[in-house]
């Protein structure tokens, strides 16, 4: 039984999700205490509980402590089973985080799985759908793990109601680690504004301000189409496409925050990444660590990547991964950011 302190490091829900994912992948049980102890609302919130219940369903686990606000959890995994699954957060909580919890396990299964998820698709402090579709999933495909993602309906806080469908193909025998130290040549950059149920002037102002800040214009600035009954909500996205990867940066509008501030904040994120020569942005570096570590463990071959920033979130994730897998993350400053090497031990 692996014992994990949920208040260690960054102390957030990623500790729970990584533990669940790797418990299913490796068959190791874990006990997690002090879950989100330092947060304003400690313990399991609904989206975290949905992650636990989704993992339980995927592998037939024995679980104790799976209750709202619970600060301790014991998880004893069973055999991962491919299948058709439907997980609904029931609130505007992020369903993309639920997907990332079960995704690694389902790619280790012996048959394709189809997953339907409901909840928030574009949430602060969570990977938006378009980040997973354009940044995360293409790298997984290069790793040998293919998936097809479809956005059926946008979901924003506080209404939620978003819907995603995903098909995950088995990849256990296909995973091959690779180095990702150079983003490659710039192919294109473009911005989109999702603003369902809001005046069109909101999207126009955000895009115009962002275009001015980044020197983008014309077809680089796009008002994204929305579907009936989506929203209200507002997400401003910038997508940077390079030969070796794509990065997606997102800022969210909210009541009392001007369109100009949303655009300025996003421009700041984009410029910070562009000033670095590293391959991955701070969020993608965090997300990439787990699937890469799985491939390194299975093939017993090291792999490296560079990132513009090494966040506390990423460092905490590295620590949790090392508890479940016989791998070691080594980090060192490099030109334009950080170098991270993942080695089998």
Image (tube, rainbow, N blue to C red):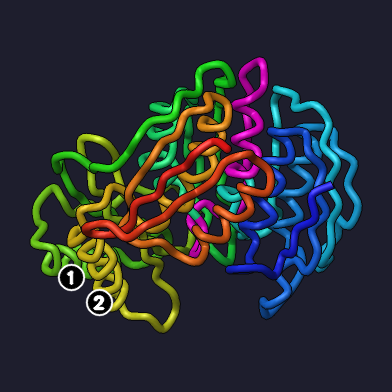
Q: Which mark is residue 260?
A: 2
Q: Is 39 situated left or right of 121 in this image? A: right
Picture quadrant where residue 133 is located: top left
Q: Is 183 situated left or right of 51 in this image? A: left
Asked if labels 2 and 1 touch by Cβ distance under 8 angstroms, the answer is yes
Q: Is 78 situated left or right of 187 in this image? A: right
Residue 193 shows in this picture: no
Q: Is residue 124 magenta?
A: yes
Which residue: 49% across, 58% down? Answer: 314
Where is residue 210? Give x, y as percent.
19, 66
Q: Residues within 10 Å of mark 1 (few under 14, many from 20)?
A: some
Residue 243 shows in this picture: yes
Q: What is the secondary structure assignment of the residue under circle 1?
A: helix
Q: Is 249 situated left or right of 65 in this image? A: left
Q: Residues within 10 Å of mark 2 (few under 14, many from 20)?
A: some
Give the spatial CA distance, label 1 vs label 2.
Answer: 6 Å
Instruction: Please tell me which residue lies in front, 283 or 289.
Output: 289
Which residue: 56% across, 34% down? Answer: 294
Instruction: Please tell me which residue lies in front, 340 or 251.
Output: 340
Where is residue 212? Give x, y as percent.
11, 68
Picture quadrant where residue 202 is located: bottom left
Q: Which residues are magenta?
A: 99-126
Residue farthest bottom in this picture: 256
Q: Which residue matches tag 1?
A: 209
Image: 270 above or below 170:
below
Q: Earlier in the sequence, mark 1 or mark 2?
A: 1
Which residue: 60% across, 35% down? Answer: 104
């Amino acid at each position: 039984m692996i014992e994990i302190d949920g208040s260690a490091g960054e102390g957030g829900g990623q500790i729970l999700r990584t533990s669940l994912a790797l418990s299913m992948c490796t068959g190791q049980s874990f006990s997690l205490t002090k879950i989100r102890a330092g947060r304003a609302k400690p313990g399991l919130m609904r989206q975290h509980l949905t992650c636990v219940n989704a993992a339980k369903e995927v592998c037939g686990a024995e679980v104790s402590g799976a209750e709202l606000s619970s600060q301790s959890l014991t998880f004893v995994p069973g055999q991962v089973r491919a299948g058709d699954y439907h997980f609904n957060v029931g609130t505007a909580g992020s369903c993309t985080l639920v997907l990332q919890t079960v995704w690694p396990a389902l790619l280790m299964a012996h048959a394709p799985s189809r997953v339907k998820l409901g909840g928030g698709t574009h949430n602060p402090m969570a990977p938006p759908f378009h980040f997973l579709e354009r940044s995360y999933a293409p790298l997984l495909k290069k790793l040998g793990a293919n998936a097809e993602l479809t956005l059926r309906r946008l979901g924003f806080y506080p209404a939620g109601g978003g819907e995603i469908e995903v098909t995950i193909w088995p990849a256990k025998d296909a995973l091959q680690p690779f180095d990702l130290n150079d983003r490659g040549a710039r192919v294109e950059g473009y911005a989109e504004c999702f603003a369902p149920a809001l005046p069109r002037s909101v999207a126009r102002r955000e895009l115009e301000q962002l275009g001015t800040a980044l020197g983008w214009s014309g077809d680089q600035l796009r008002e994204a189409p929305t579907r009936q009954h989506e929203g209200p909500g507002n997400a401003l996205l910038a997508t940077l496409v390079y030969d070796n990867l794509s990065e997606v940066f997102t800022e969210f509008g909210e009541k009392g925050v001007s369109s100009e501030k949303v655009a300025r904040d996003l421009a700041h994120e984009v410029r910070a990444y562009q000033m670095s020569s590293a391959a991955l942005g701070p969020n993608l570096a965090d997300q990439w660590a787990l699937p890469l570590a799985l491939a390194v463990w299975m093939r017993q071959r090291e792999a490296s990547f560079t990132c513009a920033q090494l966040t506390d979130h990423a460092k905490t994730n590295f620590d949790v991964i090392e508890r479940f897998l016989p791998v070691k993350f080594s980090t060192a400053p490099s030109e334009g950011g950080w170098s991270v090497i993942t080695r089998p031990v």
